[in-house]
Image: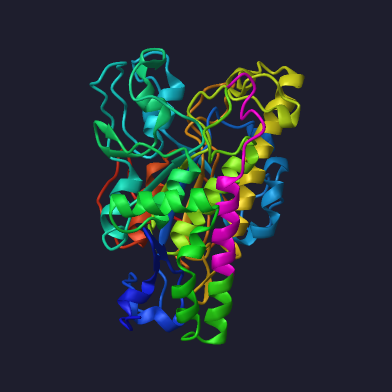
């Protein structure tokens, strides 16, 4: 076995390059952002469609002494690592003369702050999204400059919302003004992308061997793992064991047979996609956490569903579509059901945040070293408004943000000001981004 430190950032086997998490004994081998002993900063942007029932989202009190409202109650374990931001707006998600199509515009504008050209053809145009701006800086030394995830398939053409291309509804990440960075919706393919190594032939042979012999990817790197473990201290050994156990659990979920329909009225999902929507979101969140933990990427976007999604939630005894219910017209029964969906999404978010918060990373946790934004570019789905958006930030961003607060900003403060501030804290100095008007104050 070679003793090169750079060699030890991976465990290798047939067609496999299993990246390692941050281990103190291997710190000199890593290309971390500032010093060899400090983990890197990560950014994540999580999108939910159709707005939120805002009375159940917005805390009454401002500052530190606020109570989590019903929809945000599942986030109590990480309350002190949250910023709930009220008053932010996305003007470019409004029609501004283009007529209906708020859902498509909301996704297209969410990370770009740019008015999407209204078209159902190939001439889509919006703007470069904040994640791709960040990826050019934070992703220069990682295997994947950015990772785009989603839990609902989409199309890159056709009319999905009153004359707006499906490319707008299905994507929040835009590599160029005219080209989205298409998301991956199959956890198995994400897993192979993260942990496959070598040539295409090697990766194919690795997957074929695992499928035929019903073995784990960890079996292919077992010898390498045992040799590495002998060189590590006790604390690093424990972290390595926890990481490998986490990989094994995710792999089990990806390879287990599917027995239920994913969504009512749809076909059985492809192998690797859980039949249960909640398990699906959690699994994709776990893969994002693994990608961060192993420094495969430092930038991720994650769409819980596409803009205007009509997903049903039979597990909540909600058989009507999400989009339909968001237009509740103050019907109490519909409001109750939309509140259930909002709460369920936040419960799934809580799983992701607690996964990040329970993963050691340097002297803190993955969540401590992350700036994660969760929200929508539609406020109240019934009103289709694009002001006072439901936005929260989780993670301290390596102490860049003073968390544990609810902050209310002046009406019409651009959401892009938050993203510009995040980039600034990450060392990316820009004068503007989308329709930003400056840095967002009162975050530090």
Looking at the image, how many numbered discs can be counted on the residues?
0
Specify whether residue 248 is painted magenta: yes
Q: Residue at x 46, y 86 (%)?
A: 231
- Horizontally, residue 144 falls left or right of residue 39, namely left
Q: Is residue 405 visible?
A: no
**Image quadrant in which the N terminus is located:** bottom left
Q: Is residue 441 visible?
A: yes
- Horizontally, residue 119 falls left or right of residue 273, namely left
From the top left corner, tell me how far across and down residue 135 is, in percent.
Answer: 31, 53
> Image quadrant of residue 338?
top right
> Image quadrant of residue 405?
bottom right
Q: Residue at x 58, y 77 (%)?
A: 238
Instruction: Please identify the residue farthest to the front as the structure is shown.
Output: 213
From the top left corner, tell me how far across and down residue 227 is, in percent.
Answer: 46, 81
Q: Residue at x 28, y 30 (%)?
A: 126
- The stretch of residues the image draws in magenta is 242-266
Look at the picture and state if 316 lies above or below 409: above
Q: Residue at x 46, y 69 (%)?
A: 21
């Amino acid at each position: 076995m070679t003793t090169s430190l750079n060699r030890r950032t991976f465990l290798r086997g047939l067609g496999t390059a299993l990246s390692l998490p941050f281990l103190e004994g291997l710190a000199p081998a890593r290309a971390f952002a500032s010093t060899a002993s400090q983990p890197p900063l990560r950014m994540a942007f999580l999108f939910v469609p159709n707005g939120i029932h805002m009375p159940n989202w917005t805390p009454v009190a401002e500052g530190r002494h606020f109570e989590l409202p019903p929809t945000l109650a599942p986030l109590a374990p990480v309350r002190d690592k949250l910023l709930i931001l009220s008053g932010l707006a996305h003007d470019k998600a409004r029609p501004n003369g283009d007529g209906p199509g708020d859902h498509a515009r909301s996704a297209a504008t969410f990370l770009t702050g740019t008015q999407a050209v209204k078209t159902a053809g190939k001439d889509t145009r919006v703007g470069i999204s904040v994640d791709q701006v960040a990826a050019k800086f934070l992703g220069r030394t990682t295997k994947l400059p950015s990772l785009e995830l989603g839990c609902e398939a989409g199309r890159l053409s056709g009319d999905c919302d009153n004359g707006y291309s499906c490319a707008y509804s299905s994507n929040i990440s835009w590599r160029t003004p005219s080209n989205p960075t298409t998301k991956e919706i199959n956890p198995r393919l994400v897993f192979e992308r993260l942990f496959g190594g070598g040539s295409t032939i090697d990766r194919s042979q690795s997957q074929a061997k695992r499928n035929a012999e019903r073995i784990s990817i960890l079996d292919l790197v077992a010898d390498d793992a045992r040799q590495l473990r002998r060189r590590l201290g006790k604390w690093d050994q424990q972290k390595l064991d926890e990481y490998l156990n986490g990989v094994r659990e995710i792999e089990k979920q990806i390879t287990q047979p599917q027995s239920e329909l994913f969504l009512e009225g749809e076909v059985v999902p492809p192998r690797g996609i859980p039949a249960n929507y909640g398990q699906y979101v959690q699994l994709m969140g776990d893969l994002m956490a693994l990608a961060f933990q192993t420094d495969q990427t430092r930038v991720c976007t994650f769409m819980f569903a596409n803009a205007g999604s009509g997903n049903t939630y039979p597990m909540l005894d909600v058989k009507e579509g999400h989009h339909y219910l968001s237009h509740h017209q103050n019907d109490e029964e519909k409001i109750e059901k939309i509140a259930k969906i909002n709460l369920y999404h936040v419960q799934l978010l809580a799983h992701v945040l607690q996964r990040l918060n329970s993963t050691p990373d340097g002297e803190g946790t993955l969540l401590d070293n992350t700036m994660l934004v969760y929200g929508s570019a539609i406020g109240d789905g019934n009103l289709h408004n694009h002001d006072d958006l439901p936005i929260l930030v989780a993670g301290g961003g390596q102490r860049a943000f003073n968390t544990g607060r609810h902050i209310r900003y002046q009406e019409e403060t651009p959401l892009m000001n938050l993203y510009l501030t995040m980039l600034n804290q990450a060392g990316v100095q820009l004068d503007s981004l989308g329709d930003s008007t400056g840095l967002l104050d009162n975050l530090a």
